[in-house]
Amino acid sequence: MSAVTEPSTTAPAGPPESPPRDRSRPSELSLVITAMLLDAAVLVTGFVGAHMFRFDTGLFQGPSEPLRIEHWWTLVILLPTWVLLHGANGLYRPRSLETTLDQIVGVMKAVSLGCLFVLALGFLTKTSYFYEKRLVLIFAWLFTMTLSLVVRFAILRPFYRRHFSEHSRHQRIVIVGAGVEGTRFLARIRENEALSYDVVAFVDDDPAKHGMEIDGVRVHGSADILPEVVREVQADQVFVAIPSLGQEGTLAMMSRCMTAGLPVRLVNDILHLIVADTQVETIDGVPTYEIRTDTAPQLSLFIKRAFDLLVAGGLLLCFFPLFLFIAMLIKIFSPGPVLFRQVRAGQFGSEFTMSKFRTMRLETDDAIHREYATNFITGKQLEFTDEKKKSAESVFKMTKDPRITPIGAILRRTSLDELPQLLNVVRGEMSVVGPRPPIFYELNHYKEWHKKRLRAKPGLTGLWQVSGRSTVPFDEMVLLDLYYIDHWSLKTDLEILFRTIPVVLYGEGAY
């Protein structure tokens, strides 16, 4: 197939720089492995001890019930779930060992869910191992919870403190916001030295606070000079402690803080405004929420790549006759090449050439799209050229582009013009599900936090496409992309794929 290629447009703004990653030291890894092994020992000891206590001590009436091989297989099946439940409740984060309340709540949740898993396993397999009598499971719940807390407070916490005192240094942090929330957060950190944080600077947009000291910590200036401040004080992290900023204010503050190139955490109740993150760490009872900048684990990337190859390869085989039919229609009704190729920004801002079925006339001016992109990214609602749409909902996409051919309009309405991008997926330049790839000149209008969407491979479909497309403003589109990146799972990709089907069939939000 012939193709037309748009010349590469070099953007002044290159790919976003990734901040230094906080790689776990070997001592921390050994602590996590030790905790997992001890949790496995607690599981076996607690459940076996509960069974023996009920049947072998003579304290309860009824016949004895010996341990069978099936009991041990039940524990083998339960073990990985047990460890995962402890990890999901934050019990393997080293710093959480210093927070007593978090440990107690986490252990209660993990142990309770583990016991419910045993009940569910028995229901599915029609067996009753470890709850031949209800007291067995109750004792198992009580024993494992008690043992787990003892292990954490008597073994793991002292082990962590030795590691902390010998090998770890305090994390130097800058607090954005020198008001009541920031001052209170400083006091909480000072009260608990084991948290391993050292507040070295404040920044605040209130000029009246510039130069003053709060409990010995200087307010250096506004958030605009944060990059200079973190270099001066050699900071490791940034904490934003400004409540009630509102969504727009929080997003703007994120953008300013991310220019420092350090991990950024939001303090207290700001999380509901930033759906792109749920990584929670409690610091002396105060929840903080990390604005993630790292990439997915290698195993997740491998699974996603395998999924992409399977889906893209299958769709290419299924739709090959449709490819030929569309190519024939384009050739008949619009002279010129079948494919349109354009240089786009891929993962981390790398260049790649994206392919689509050509839907526009040849030698068209891209000034219309440049104006649209500027308005869309900066939040301006587009002017309609279609009178029938004026009374409808707000739209942030061109509803009538004079450059589009009649066949192109049908292809766009059904999203069939995107099918050649399956080849980009096979080549590893794109993914089946992910953020849409921007054109390089669009990056000129990105705020700092917008660039976080480039952390993932661009995709054929995504949360934006199944959430209204043309009715979703750009900032909300980016938030959807960030939410997807930080919450990726194979289940999420499957759900988005299935939700894409009616969107394509009914042309929802497509123009």
Image: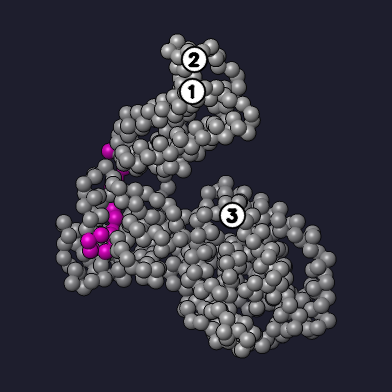
In this rendering, is residue 12 above or below 291?
below
Going from N to C along the chain, the mark reached first, 2 or 1, is 2
SS for dot 2: helix
Between 225 and 285, the one lying in front of the other is: 285
SS for dot 3: helix
Q: Residues within 10 Å of mark 3 (few under 14, many from 20)?
A: some
Quarter of the figure with residue 293:
bottom left
Residue 60 horizontal/vertical position (percent)? 45, 14
Which residue is under mark 3? 492
Give the quadrant of the N terminus.
bottom right
Verify whether residue 178 appears in magenta. yes
Q: Residues within 10 Å of mark 2 (few under 14, many from 20)?
A: some
Which residue is under mark 2? 55
Q: Which region is colored magenta?
A: 165-181
Do labels 3 and 1 touch, CB within 8 Å? no
Which residue is under mark 1? 136
Look at the image and tell me whether residue 33 can be seen: no
Task: Measure the C-alpha gap from mark 3 to mark 1.
Answer: 38 Å
Of circles 3 and 1, the one toward us is 1
